[in-house]
Image (spheres, helix red, strand yellow):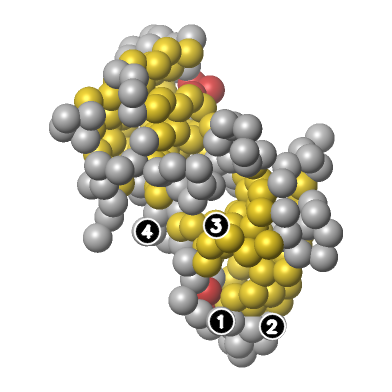
Amino acid sequence: DPKIIQKPKYLVAVTGSEKILICEQYLGHNAMYWYRQSAKKPLEFMFSYSYQKLMDNQTASSRFQPQSSKKNHLDLQITALKPDDSATYFCASSQEGQGNERLFFGHGTKLSVL
Amino acid sequence: QQQVRQSPQSLTVWEGETAILNCSYENSAFDYFPWYQQFPGEGPALLIAIRSVSDKKEDGRFTIFFNKREKKLSLHITDSQPGDSATYFCAAKKGNTGKLIFGLGTTLQVQP
């Protein structure tokens, strides 16, 4: 059973549109993250949330907005989509504060912007 | 400017051989170095990790060798199996944060 559920697995969007990537984790973790994996680039940290509060934001563009409606949810809203946004977006989680630094990743949402 | 570098980009070994994957980093403040394994269509999964206070970490067929002075580390996979064929990412971070800095990865192919 996947412990981190990302929906959808694949997503095709047109330039200028808006999409929401869904992430739910069932590991009981208090911290959640978004990472992006683009072609020819390293897996890149985007956001971190702890207890539903934004802790770190490394995404320059305000077009990317994380949304945490519940403790185990961290969705990612992307507006005014551009072809450069095409990537696989990974949600991850961890249990902070207990010396456990292990990040668990979901299977990703592969976004293609046409 | 890449903070974590990996080599080679791809590696092919025969079943039973030892695969050696290399990693180097820039920031001397990094103190935790996990290696993640990723299969196509899946997310990265933690394989093994080392802290900067250690120079070696072993887990079964997987061993990390760490050289703090040279800011280098390597992952050795002994008795490689076809099921080990995957992309391996070296990552690094400092302090109590979930922000990992990843390398570009090494794609390992183990031929039967």
**Among the two numbered marks 4 and 3 on one chain, the one whose residue lies closer to the N terminus:** 3
Residue bearing mark 1: A62
Secondary structure found at label 4: loop
Which chain hosts label 1? A
Is the Cβ of the residue at disc 1 closer than 8 Å to that at disc 2?
no
Q: Secondary structure at mark 2?
A: loop
Q: CA distance from mark 4 to mark 3?
A: 15 Å
Badge 4 density bin: few <14, some 14–19, many ≥20, Cα 10 Å: few
Q: Chain of mark 4?
A: A
Mark in front: 4 vs 3: 3
Q: What residue do we see at 44% from left, 42% from top?
A: B95
Disc with the residue nearer the chain's start (1 vs 3) = 3
Kind of residue at disc 1: Ser
The span from disc 3 to disc 2 (Cα, nearest Å) is: 19 Å
Looking at the rendered structure, which numbered label has been put on residue A35?
Answer: 3
Q: CA distance from mark 1 to mark 2?
A: 13 Å
Q: Of callouts 4 and 2, which one flags the residue occurring earlier in the amino acid sequence?
A: 2
Q: Are marks 1 and 4 on the same chain?
A: yes
Label 1 or label 4, whichever lies nearer to me, is 1
Could you tell me which residue is drawn at 55 percent across and 36 percent down?
A: A101
Q: Quadrant of the C terminus of chain A?
A: bottom right
Tell me residue A92's x, y (percent): 63, 48
Spot occupied by residue B88 in the image (x, y as percentages of width and height): 43, 35
> Which residue has dot 4 on it?
A40
Earlier along the polypeptide chain: callout 1 or callout 2? Answer: 2
Give the chain of mark 2: A
